[in-house]
Image (cartoon, rainbow, N blue to C red):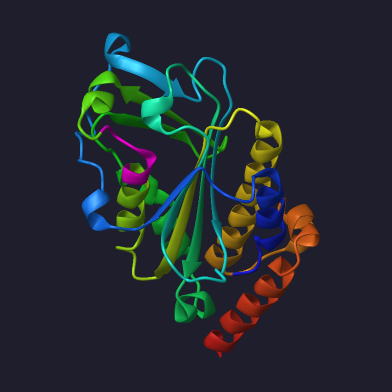
Amino acid sequence: MKLFEDVIKEVRALLSDLPDKSCGFEECLCAEPGDKNALLFRSDTAFELGGGGKYAVESTMFTSFSKAEDEILLFGKDLNEITEDVSFAHLTFIQLKEHSEENLHYEQLKNIGFTVFRLYPKGYHIRISPSAGREQVKVSKEALKRNPPLSFMNIGCSLIKLLKEQDDVAYVKTVFITCPDVDYPALAALARKAKRITDAVQKTLQLDELDCAACKMKPICDEVEGLRELHFKKEKERKNNAT
């Protein structure tokens, strides 16, 4: 899906050419599952990613990879190197299977979008606000005392495993950013734009008929190449199916 390509190019421009850490997906690296109802008290918390008034950016985008493989990338310090609240961004890029992209439907995107809410590694308590594009994480002291300590590589492998349980997902790259030099306000703006694109795609796929003149998604459809084409393609499919 090429709708997010311009946004992704801008994201790449904000990051260094090489990550500080990376690895491919290995199921043995997945984090130990935790209790989704567990509470993490302040006294048991080592720090909060995106806490203390820091930036906390979250976004999921769809793309095609030049090198097709699952991968976790880290720009900045890993969990065991952090000692206080830091600004944080978590970006996930997903490539759909070719047949899925051709027959894209609303339930696919909804199921993929909700996958992150099934991720609750032990000692890594995630709070996400999809509408605001924010992800904050409390990390427990206990998780950092393990041997080896909890790592972003563990979290990334767990997320990729969940996402690839969706039949439509081909490959996943998930990126964690803790580097203090990154332009987080710019990342947050790009995450908001990606969310508007996703919302426009979902509306196009969900509704039986769209009135572009009255639709609040019209500005983003006019801005992003491919959204209007998707709209007209789906409109034509609906009319063909109705005859």
Name which quarter of the figure residue 128 lies in: top left
Q: Tell me if 90 is positioned left or right of 229 in this view.
A: left
Residue 169 lies in the magenta-colored region:
no
Residue 25, percent across and down? 34, 58
Quadrant for residue 45, please give it.
top left
Q: Nearer the viewer, residue 190 or 211?
A: 190
Q: Would you place residue 51 above or below residue 95 in this image?
A: above
Q: Could you tell me residue 197's position as x and y percent?
A: 65, 55
Give the side of residue 125 with respect to residue 68, left or right.
Answer: left
Quadrant holding the C terminus:
bottom right
Quarter of the figure that contains the N terminus: bottom right
Q: Residue at x 59, y 26 (%)?
A: 55
Q: Which residues are magenta?
A: 149-154
Q: Residue furthest bottom?
A: 243
Q: Residue at x 34, y 70 (%)?
A: 167
In screen coordinates, is 117 left or right of 182?
Answer: left
Would you place residue 230 above or below residue 31 in this image? Answer: below
Q: In front: 214, or 12?
A: 12
Residue in view at x 65 percent, y 34 percent: 182
Q: Residue 60 at what x, y percent from top left?
A: 52, 51
- Using the image, determine if residue 223 lies above or below residue 144: below
| Residue 6: x %, y % from top left | 72, 59
User: Would you place residue 184 above or below residue 93 in this image?
Assistant: above
Please tell me how many numbered marks the rendered image carries: 0
